[in-house]
Amino acid sequence: MNKTLSWLIFAVVICVVVFFNQRRRFSSDESDSTNAITPAKESPTRGSSYCISQQSVGAYSEKNYELLTKYSVRKEAKLFGEMIMDGRAVILEQGTKVFIEDAGIIKTVIRLPNEADQIWIASEFVKRCN
């Protein structure tokens, strides 16, 4: 019983720390007036115009997005680079205007203006343009 209670307290403390850290990070992003791209005040909607907040990499399919994420986490630079060279992934520069196709909490599907291809990207890199 004592061991279970210790784990429960530990889990609650971790959750509280993560919550306040995320809240503090989001608040500091909103107060940064030098940033040309600000966090969205509302959820992105399909067809809305947004911008890429910092240079990032997106994938041309959900399967390739999962591989890209796996290679990034494992620091497999060669495989990561091969995806870009093979055309399965693309580098998106900061400030690039995009249209939302499907907004999610973890990943968002976007489309570049005048292009039909969909790109899967981490949602944290898609912000409302000023």
Image (cartoon, rainbow, N blue to C red):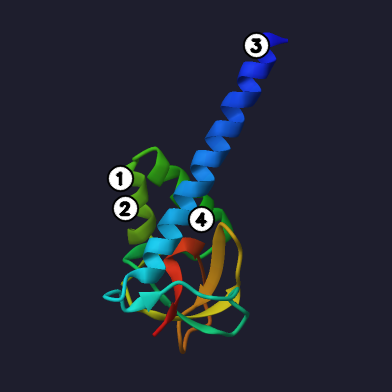
Q: Could you tell me which residue is drawn at 45 percent across and 61 percent down?
A: 26
Q: Which mark is residue 60?
A: none
Q: Amino acid at mark 2?
A: Gly
Give the alpha-carbon distance from disc 2 to disc 1, as whole Å.
5 Å
Q: Could you tell me which secondary element the residue under label 2 belongs to?
A: helix
Q: Amino acid at mark 3?
A: Lys
Give 48 or 111, whichever is nearer the viewer. 48
Q: Amino acid at mark 1?
A: Lys
Give the alpha-carbon distance from disc 1 to disc 3, as whole Å.
44 Å
Q: Which residue is mark 4?
A: 64
- The reply to whether the C-beta atoms of the residues labelled 2 and 1 are less than 8 Å apart is yes
- The reply to whether the C-beta atoms of the residues labelled 2 and 3 are less than 8 Å apart is no
Going from N to C along the chain, the mark reached first, 3 or 4, is 3
- The reply to whether the C-beta atoms of the residues labelled 4 and 1 are less than 8 Å apart is no
The residue positioned farthest toward the top in the image shown: 2
Q: Quadrant of residue 127?
A: bottom left
Q: Which residue is mark 1?
A: 78
Give the alpha-carbon distance from disc 2 to disc 4, as whole Å.
13 Å
Q: Quadrant of residue 63?
A: bottom right
Q: Which residue is mark 2?
A: 81
Which mark lies nearer to you, 1 or 3? 3
**Residue 88 appears in the picture as rendered:** no
Q: Position of residue 12 (x, y in %)?
A: 61, 33
Q: Could you tell me which residue is drawn at 55 percent across and 60 percent down?
A: 107
Q: Could you tell me which secondary element the residue under label 1 belongs to?
A: helix
Q: Which mark is residue 3?
A: 3
Q: Quadrant of the C terminus?
A: bottom left
Give the alpha-carbon distance from disc 3 to disc 4, as whole Å.
42 Å
